[in-house]
Structures are given as C-alpha cells and as structure tokens.
Image (cartoon, rainbow, N blue to C red):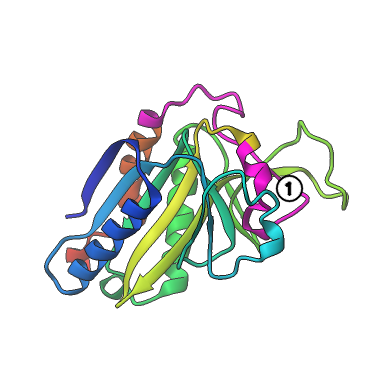
Amino acid sequence: MVEWITHDGLLPYDEAVTFMEARAEAIARGEAGECIWLVEHPPLYTAGTSAKPADLTDPDRFPVYESKRGGQYTYHGPGQRVAYVMLDVGKRGHDVRRFVQQLEEWVIATLAEFALIGEIREGRVGVWVARPDKPLTASGAPAEDKIAAIGIRLRKWVSFHGISINVEPDLDHFSGIVPCGITDYGVTSLVDLGLPVTMTDVDVALRATFDTVFDPLDQK
C-alpha cells in the first residue's frame, strides 16, 4: 500500500529534500513502503538540473534552491499543492518515460474532477489549459496557461520530487523566473480560472484518481 502523508503548514524546502532522500533510500532497501507526501512551501524558487541563470529574472526576491530534479526553474509557495512522489519505479515497469506520462495523466485526471481539461504539449513540460478568453500569443498561437509542473529524480529506481498544482497561489510570484524556461505563455490556477476549489478538494481528487493511473505493486 502507498502511504499518504499530508503536512500541515508551510514546510521548509530543505526539510522536504532531507525527508524525500531518506525515504527513497529506505524504499530502495526494502525497509519502507512507497509514499505520497502532500505539502505546501513558503515562497521559493528551485533550479532543476537544466536551469539557465538568465531565467532567474529576480534572484533576490525569494530564496533559490539548487534541486537535483529534472527541469528548469519553478516556483513553490502558499496556495500550491506539491505532491512529492516516492514510488518504486523499478517495480512499476522500469520505464522512466512511461512513469512521467503517468504523472501527467494523474494531474489531468485530478483536474478533470473539477471539469477542467488539462493537456500536454510537445516541447513544453507540465500541464496546460486553454485560455480562449485571452489574446493570441506573440507568435499568433492560441493562449494557454500552465497550471501544473512536473519534475522528478530517480535514485536506485525510486522516485522523489514530483508534481505541483496551482490551487490559489499568488501568481505574481511566478514573475521572478521564466517558469520551466518557457516564454510566450502564462501561469494560472484553479481559483484564477473561477473554480472555488480548496486545497482539501485537490487532496481528495489526487487520492481518488491515483489508483486509476498507477497500478498496485501486487499486480506487477
């Protein structure tokens, strides 16, 4: 069984990394079960392994943490649900690409619980929603906003880091970075889209949809 833990209050990022790394090692040794950890952080930026310094446009705004996850710069803060995913990918098919696709499917299924269509775009990481209410982009493409980010790391075939869904964060906080190195597109949240959704609502949806995407290990 996957253990679900919800952290109350704002969790310092360093504490999150320490916990994840220890739990992933314990899972790899067979000393602990898989875990989904639901947290919120104080305002901060993290730099993934592909982060470009030029994409940190306001380096003095919030603390910046070097992260060993894949990807570029991202923001975490109050009103954003971060789900840290410590799963045994080695026992779940040994397929990293498929695992990332499952994380995307999980986010999309969670958004669908609120009648919101999330989509994946080639060359643009994360999950996106169409914004027909907004002008076309500078390149003439239909407007879309990012609502969720995905970034993971594997160690001994156990994952850590995970996904983040914007529930009701301060969207201006994203302006200190180029989120995931992607320009021309914006960032949104469930509440920004007019959905009266709480963090608890999102947590319920994450748990309700998890088993529709990820098979139990005892079926492998």
Q: Is residue 5 left or right of residue 52?
A: left
Q: Residue at x 84, y 42 (%)?
A: 136
Q: Quadrant of the N terminus?
A: bottom left
Q: Residue at x 59, y 70 (%)?
A: 50
Q: Which residue is mark 1?
A: 185
Q: Is residue 214 visible?
A: no
Q: Is residue 33 left or right of residue 131?
A: left
Q: Position of residue 75 (x, y in %)?
A: 55, 48
Q: Is residue 152 left or right of residue 147?
A: left
Q: Position of residue 135 (x, y in %)?
A: 83, 37
199 in magenta: yes
Q: Is residue 75 visible?
A: yes
Q: In the rendered structure, which amino acid carries the disc numbered 1?
A: Tyr
Rendered view: 5 above or below 55: above
Q: Quadrant of residue 202?
A: top left
How many numbered markers are drawn?
1
Q: Quadrant of the C terminus?
A: bottom left
Q: Position of residue 204 (x, y in %)?
A: 33, 35
Rendered view: 28 above or below 108: below
Write down the region rendered in magenta.
173-201
Could you say which is closer to the camera, residue 127 or residue 84?
84
Tell me the SS state at disc 1: loop
Could you say which is closer to the camera, residue 31 or residue 135?
31
Mark 1 neighbour class, 10 Å CA radius: few under 14, some 14 to 19, many 20 or more? some
